[in-house]
Amino acid sequence: GFKTGIVGLPNVGKSTLFNALTRTAAAQAANFPFCTIEPNVGEVAVPDPRLATLSEIAGSKQVIPARMTFVDIAGLVKGASKGEGLGNQFLANIRECDAIAHVLRCFEDEDVTHVDGRVDPLADAETIETELMLADMESIEKRLQGLVRKVRGGEKEAVQQERLLKDAMAALEDGRPARTVEVSDDDMKTWKGLQLLTQKPVLYVCNVDEGEAAEGNAHSAKVAEKAAAEGAVSVVISARIEEEISQLDDEEAEMFLSEMGLEEAGLSRVIRAGYQLLGLQTYFTVGPKEARAWTIRTGTLAPQAAGVIHGDFERGFIRAETIGYDDYVALKGEQGAKDAGKMRVEGKGYEVKDGDVLHFLFNA
Ligand code: GDP
């Protein structure tokens, strides 16, 4: 599955957010056991109103949303790259994630200590980013040393890795994260394989006070500006509100939200932003038994999309009966779409579109 690591300085609201994320009614409603893989790892349902619409049309008994994994990575402090705080273990946890949700404290509260004694989300962002950059520089140095002999021997892959590691190092020495390096298509696979911490896409989560969740505040505005300049994404939430909402049932939660002037729970926005950040999209399988959402990377071809359900589907792939989401809804289901000639038969080269309703045929 796809994993997002929640990072941030101590006392910014990471655990509050993580607990809210993994306890939310949405995560549990669809018979979605919040599974504790480890105390700090949780799975959440990806909110998608299309799934309810599809299941209603098909009369599906069960509805199974797509899911995403969040990991609460505590312990990142100044000096982490030098093994201070809980240091390297946490950097290793981040390495395993596909994306980073960086929680920034944008709330003022004298009762909650700030590690540096003041609320300044941009400075906090820099503190964390600096640790990640230092950790990358250290690991690049080690890896370059490890490559020396192979490069001398003229090994092609080693030569390519060395070149890309040096590109990353140049950016880092210039004070920029590795994700700012432009990489050609030919280098992309090797580049991704480098697994540097600052390569990962970042979502800034501005944690504001209860009263500011709808509009944000001056702190979160600065973060939004920073994010825009970096081509990153930022969302405003109040972790405290989300914690309260996560304990309510759907109906109560909706009332609470409208009282606060909010259209949807901030968590839904965090989850969806994470999804977007990872370049993910959804296709559906729909029938009387279940309606289910499946996650794929944008650009995935039909056989690999089938492989998300089961390896046999990919290996024995024959074709995919395909109905676009809008057609499925407008024509009131599979039969209607078939009758109107809107069910297409797609082959191995088909690039699955977001919202496609698919039925795979395969050799067992
Ligand atoms: P972590 O160390 O980053 O995991 O931070 P926690 O989630 O443990 O939160 C630290 C403290 O800040 C707790 O006492 C939270 O209740 C409090 N806190 C979290 N979010 C907010 C918020 O939006 N407003 C206020 N006033 N306090 C918050």
Image (cartoon, helix red, strand yellow):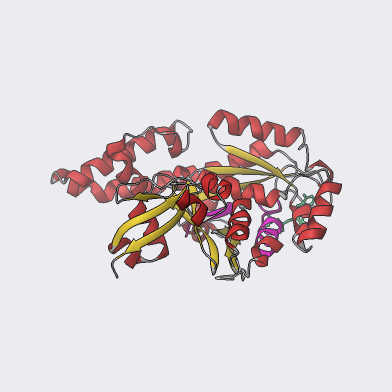
For residue 23, above or below residue 355:
below
Q: Residue, x 77% and y 35% (percent of image)?
A: 217
Give left or right: position of 69 versus 121: left
Q: Quadrant of ligand 1?
A: bottom right
- Where, by quadrant of the figure, is residue 180 drawn? top left
Give left or right: position of 302 versus 121: left
For residue 309, above or below residue 220:
below
**Can you give x and y, in whole percent of width and height, for residue 64 in the image?**
57, 64
Q: Residue, x 42% and y 64% (percent of image)?
A: 309
Does the magenta segment cover residue 36?
A: no
**Can you give x and y, in whole percent of width and height, for residue 332 in the image?**
57, 52
Give left or right: position of 347 versus 172: left
- Could you tell me if residue 75 is visible in this image? no
Specify the quadrant that holds the C terminus: bottom left
Find the magenta span and give its range: 1-24
Q: Residue, x 52% and y 44% (percent of image)?
A: 277
For residue 155, above or below residue 215:
below
**Can you give x and y, in whole percent of width and height, for residue 235 in the image?**
66, 41
- Could you tell me if residue 221 is visible in this image? yes
- Where, by quadrant of the figure, is residue 32 drawn? bottom right
